[in-house]
Image (spheres, rainbow, N blue to C red):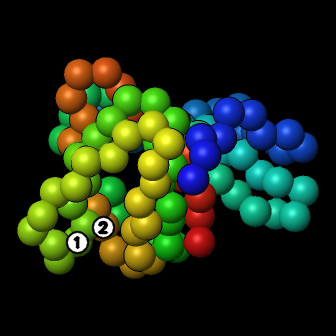
Amino acid sequence: MSTTEKIDGVAVTTKANVYFDGKCVSHTITFADGTRKSVGVIMPAALTFNTGAPEIMEGVGGSCRVRLKGETEWKTWGAGQSFDVPGNSSFDIEVSGEPYHYICHFG
């Protein structure tokens, strides 16, 4: 999978989504067909996210460790890599060192 560097033909919600006291900040982008994604950054932290719809997390900078709900093993992901998160689930994510930049593709 290649890393997305530029996205044309979208509307950007300019008010940021701020989670975990600013440890995660993203902006929602909406395509002409109604598809939504978020583009954001996670600062060094250990966080747990809950999902409604399935998500694909695409790394575009930095790296993270992820443990999906129900799993015991942590996996490391970086720029140019992505991981899938089921809907109605959760995942733990740890970022250390440089921030993790991502695009979240909703289900």
Which element is circle 1 on? loop
- Taking 22 as reference, is 59 above or below it? below
Seen in the image, is 101 located left or right of residue 94? Answer: right
For residue 90, the mark is 2
**Does residue 93 appear to the left or right of 8 in the view shown?**
left
Looking at the rendering, which quadrant does residue 63 occupy? top left
Q: Position of residue 28 (x, y in %)?
A: 65, 45
Residue that appears at 45% across and 37% down? 79
The amino acid type, in three-letter code, at marker 1 is: Lys
Rounded to the nearest angstrom, the CA distance separating label 2 from label 1 is 5 Å
Q: Earlier in the sequence, mark 2 or mark 1?
A: 1
- Residue at horizontal 28 percent and vertical 41 percent from the top: 64
Q: Quadrant of the C terminus?
A: bottom right
Q: Nearer the viewer, residue 84 or 48?
A: 84
- The residue that disc 1 covers is 69
Q: Nearer the viewer, residue 13 or 66?
A: 66
Q: Residue at x 25, y 35 (%)?
A: 95
Say which amino acid is labelled 2.
Ser
Q: Residues within 10 Å of mark 2 (few under 14, many from 20)?
A: some
Q: Is residue 97 visible?
A: yes
User: Hey, which quadrant is residue 43 in on the image?
Assistant: top left
Kindly give the residue lying farthest to the front in the view shown: 1
Secondary structure beneath label 2: strand
Direction from residue 4 to residue 97 in the image, left or right: left
Asked whether the residues under the numbered discs 2 and 1 touch, taking CB atoms below 8 Å apart as contact, a structural biologist would say yes
Q: Give the image location of residue 33, x and y in percent.
A: 87, 64
As drawn, 54 above or below 25: below
Q: Is residue 18 visible?
A: no
Q: For label 1, count other residues whose C-alpha is less than 10 Å away and answer few (under 14), some (14-19) or many (20+).
A: some
Where in the figure is residue 42, as x and y percent of width and height? 37, 34
